[in-house]
Amino acid sequence: MNQLCPLLATVLIATGCTQSSADSSLPSLADLYTESFKIGVALNPGEIAGDEPTAAELIAGQFNAYTAENDMKWERIEPTEGNFDFNVADAFVALGEKNDAFMVGHTLLWHSQTPDWVFEDENGDPASREIVLARLKHHIEAVVGRYQGRIHSWDVVNEAFNEDGTWRDSPWLRTIGPDYIARAFEFAHAADPEAALYYNDYNLFKADKRDAVVALVQSLQTEGRRIDGVGIQGHYGIGYPPMEELEASITAFGNLGVKVMITELDISVLPFPSTAQQGADISLDLELQAELNPYIDGVPADVSAALADAYRGLFELFLKHADVLDRVTLWNLTDASTWRNNWPMRGRTDHPVLFDRQNQPKDAYWALVNLKIYHDREN
Ligand code: G3I
């Protein structure tokens, strides 16, 4: 039995904490944190389809905000020009409506997972700014327009900056120029004037990247464009990132008058090949090394406790800044579905989220339950 359960049981009785309607045996993180921020999760097609009943119970009971992990990316939704595949996205929206969840569209513009045709003319040469802009507009109108009023928010632009705060050399920048971000926000706002619009990136605790995003938000605000929030992705490890730097970024973005979301939270328990490779640079694909894959058969108790401590530390910070934090989304439901098993090298066994490979709650889950109960009793 989980060591923290008896403690939880005592506190639950003392506080009269309500239990999840979807799973009679677990308290609901979404319910517990409802007055502080939303608790979200990224979903894959099997989870959207409800393939596993216990996973479906967790999705309905533990989370009140959903993001499609991959199925609203350009390559999935418009693989060839003008030919849209909305099948999984439609099912995703239907699930959100069934469970009354806050829906996040991910993502309208990204340097990755965008088909080559978007940037090429009929001869395979680089397309003109006008053509690429027209394709971007058409894509955003089609996708945002289809889900108007049903997808409540959009990661409009994903990962536009390098670690040093310079602009990422992407096909978007090369073909359209630096106003591509403003154009994307303009098109998204026109397609659904009520939808909340976000800029989303990883490693935003780094000062140079933070400054670049502050400047971006300020420039959009100066132009009078709608921007509602900054998404701090949150692909972390044990002891990483430095809390004071993350806090500085939450504060800096909050001071701009926009909301802050932790949009893609996971905490790897595995060793990184090097600190330079922390983050989420999707182009990394290193060779599998056995010494970097130590927990194939499960994590020892001390590692499980360290993960719980890491989650507790982050959520203490998030609760401190609940006035500007709108949502914390876990990037994947269980350790079985986490992308971390295949990044930065394929075939590892990671354990970075709150539910294990059998859909069972981990020490990290109970740490977040207990943290909020104690937090509420003290405040
Ligand atoms: O579904 C196909 C499968 O049919 C095929 O056999 C297999 C062969 O490789 O690929 C499968 O697709 C993979 C997909 O994940 C589903 O597993 C893609 O190759 C793989 O590239 C894709 O990776 C996703 C990655 O973004 C790139 O889109 C990860 O699941 C997803 O977690 C990750 O999410 C990103 C966020 O969107 C942005 N921030 C960083 C974050 C982590 O990289």
Image (cartoon, rainbow, N blue to C red):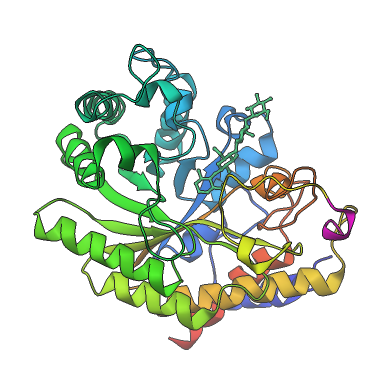
Name the residue rendered at 39%, 56% in the picture.
161
Q: Position of residue 318 (x, y in %)?
A: 45, 73
> Residue 18: x and y, percent?
53, 62
Task: Depth check: give the residue in front, 153 or 370.
Answer: 153
Q: How many marks?
A: 0
Q: Which image quarter is the C terminus in?
A: bottom left
Q: Quadrant of residue 98?
A: top left
Image quarter of the N terminus: bottom right
Tell me if I can see residue 253 in this picture: yes
- Tell me: 310 left or right of 289: left
Q: Which residues are magenta?
A: 289-294
Of the pair 241 and 168, the residue shown nearer to us:
168
Whether residue 22 is visible, yes or no, is no
Across and down, in percent, residue 240 comes to 61, 73
Q: Is residue 38 left or right of residue 365?
A: left
The residue lying furthest to the bottom in this view is 378
Residue 293 magenta-highlighted: yes
Quarter of the rendering containing residue 354 = bottom right
Name the residue nearer the viewer: 346 or 86.
346
Q: Is residue 61 above or below residue 259?
A: above
Residue 109: x and y in percent read 36, 38
Q: Is residue 201 left or right of residue 146?
A: right
* Magenta span contains residue 35: no
153 relative position to 293: left or right: left
Q: Where ligand 1 lies, by quadrant?
A: top right
- Residue positioned 29% across, 58% down in the render: 229
